[in-house]
Image: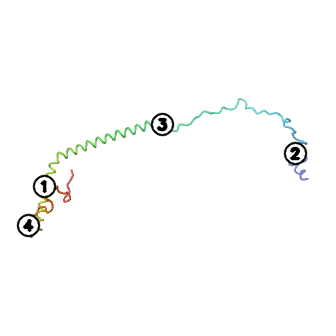
Amino acid sequence: AAIAAHRHALPRGYVLPATMTESLTRGGSGVKSIKDLPVLQDAPPPGGFPSIRIERRLPNTGPTGVAIFAVLGTVVGYGFYRLSQTKAETRFTADEIYAVRQIVNPVLQAEWDLRYLEHMRKKHEEEARIMKNVPGWVAGEPTTRKRWLPPLESWAKRGLI
């Protein structure tokens, strides 16, 4: 009764197998062998299939290695050129300053000596004032060493050119 009710919902021309054993044994309606099916050959469409592109076509992704190497070589070459120019200018400036100092050095040394002598005169005057009551004290005479040493520059800043 249930199958009969569903028979009306099936498409027209569809036949339900009578029993389950019919589908297992192929004893009833249906195809008994694959040889009973009509022959259907799978073939290409008329005119053939379109060709398949198998060659490698990559997009251009930037400059070539040779171009990059050329640009890098140019930049490095220009950098070394500028470095040599800067070193030459610096060397010229240093030579000029050295030459000027060599020319002006005697005048500066004379001024330095005058400043030193003035400083020593003031120092001896102050030493004589402080030690005036000490018998046998001679102002400006060294007490420990007898050898002359050049003065330390801590008493006055020596100006640079």
Question: Whole-Å distance between the Cαs marked 1 and 2?
Answer: 133 Å
Q: Residues within 10 Å of mark 4 (few under 14, many from 20)?
A: few
* Marks 1, 3: nearer the viewer: 1
Q: Is residue 26 left or right of residue 58?
A: right
Kind of residue at badge 1 = Leu
Q: Is residue 84 above or below residue 112?
A: above
Quarter of the rendering containing residue 43: top right
- Identify the mark nearer the N-term, 1 or 4: 1
Q: CA distance from mark 1 to mark 3?
A: 70 Å
* Real-space Cα separation, disc 4 to disc 2, in angstroms: 147 Å
Residue under numbered circle 1: 114
**105 displayed left or right of 27:** left
Residue type, label 4: Gly
Q: Are marks 1 and 3 in contact (CB under 8 Å)?
A: no
Residue 123 x %, y %: 13, 62
Q: Nearer the viewer, mark 4 or mark 2?
A: 4
